[in-house]
Amino acid sequence: MSNATDLIKQRDELNEKIDTALKSERAAALVDVKATIKLHKFTQTELKSAITTRKRKSKKKAEDANS
């Protein structure tokens, strides 16, 4: 049976591999998205309208709710 030190080392190695894989997949996805934007000639306004964001709660309203 492996001891904790060996398992921690394996975990750290796997985390590094995961980070590397995520970075390469992100880069590939970004290239694909840029190509799609260029192909369909999306404007900045069209892209901004496709993104939904949450509105931040004001601090005053949050304080009133806690009172």
Image (cartoon, rainbow, N blue to C red):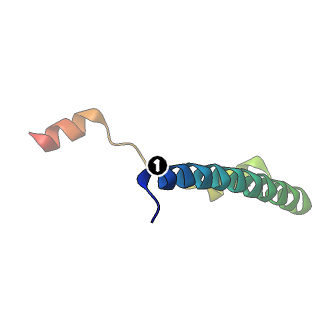
Identity, as a three-letter code, of the amino acid under mark 1: Thr
Q: Quadrant of residue 51?
A: bottom right
Q: Position of residue 11 (x, y in %)?
A: 53, 54
**Image spot of residue 26 (x, y percent):** 72, 54
- Furthest toward the top, the residue is 60
Q: Looking at the image, can residue 58 be seen?
A: yes
Q: Is residue 59 left or right of residue 65?
A: right
Q: Say which residue appears at 67% left-offset and 54% top-offset.
A: 17
Q: How many marks on residues?
A: 1
The quadrant of the image that shows the N terminus is bottom left
Give the answer, above or below, for where 58 lies relative to 31.
above
Judge from the rendering whether residue 50 lies leftward or rightward of residue 1; answer left or right.
right
Crowd around label 1: few <14 · some 14–19 · many ≥20 (10 Å): few
Residue under numbered circle 1: 5
Relative horizontal placement of residue 29, taking residue 2 as reference (left or right): right
- The quadrant the C terminus occupies is top left
